């Protein structure tokens, strides 16, 4: 039929766009250039629920589950360093106070 059978819940779409924006910024490319980002766009365009973007591989299921894989482990490492570092600094400051 050519029509996608997959869509993204609005609340989840906002989280996917935020995640994608993080990866774009870590890669030095600013924010996503489409309304929802390439990942959400690819999910809507997928006829069989599978696909990939520059940063992610995905498999969407009709029960509304999404399996998401990361393609750029260097960016995942950067993200984990930034997120983990902030959390560790916060814990250290609480321990001192």
Image (spheres, rainbow, N blue to C red):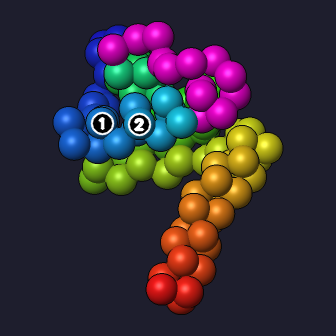
Residue 59 in the image, given as x and y percentages of width and height: 50, 43
Residue 43: which disc?
none
Residue 67, magenta (yes or no): no
Identity of the residue furthest to the right in this view: 74
Indicate the secondary structure of the residue bearing disc 2: helix
Q: Is residue 9 visible?
A: yes
Q: Is residue 45 left or right of residue 64?
A: right
The picture places residue 73, in percent across and down from the top left corner, at 76, 46
Q: Secondary structure at mark 1?
A: helix
Q: Which residue is mark 2?
A: 18
Q: Which residue is mark 1?
A: 14
Give the residues drawn in magenta, as a range.
23-35
Instruction: Kindly report the distance in space between the C-alpha atoms of the residues bearing marks 2 and 1.
Output: 6 Å
How many marks are shown on the rendered structure?
A: 2
Q: Residues within 10 Å of mark 1 (few under 14, many from 20)?
A: some
- Kindly indicate the quadrant of the structure image that contains residue 29: top right
In the image, farthest residue toward the left: 10
| Mark 2 closeness class: few <14, some 14–19, many ≥20 residues within 10 Å | some
Res 93 quadrant in image: bottom right
Residue under the image location 50 percent in, 20 percent down = 31
**Relative to 92, is 79 above or below?**
above
Residue 24 colored magenta? yes
Left or right, residue 4 beside residue 66: left
> Do the residues bearing badges 2 and 1 touch, measured as CB atoms within 8 Å?
yes
């Amino acid at each position: 039929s050519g029509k996608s059978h997959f869509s993204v819940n609005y609340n989840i779409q906002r989280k996917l766009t935020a995640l994608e924006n993080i990866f774009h910024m870590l890669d030095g490319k600013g924010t996503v250039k489409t309304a929802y980002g390439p990942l959400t766009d690819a999910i809507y365009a997928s006829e069989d629920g599978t696909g990939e973007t520059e940063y992610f591989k995905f498999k969407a299921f009709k029960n509304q589950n999404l399996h998401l894989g990361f393609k750029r482990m260097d960016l995942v490492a950067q993200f984990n360093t930034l997120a983990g570092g902030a959390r560790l600094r916060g814990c250290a400051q609480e321990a001192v106070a």
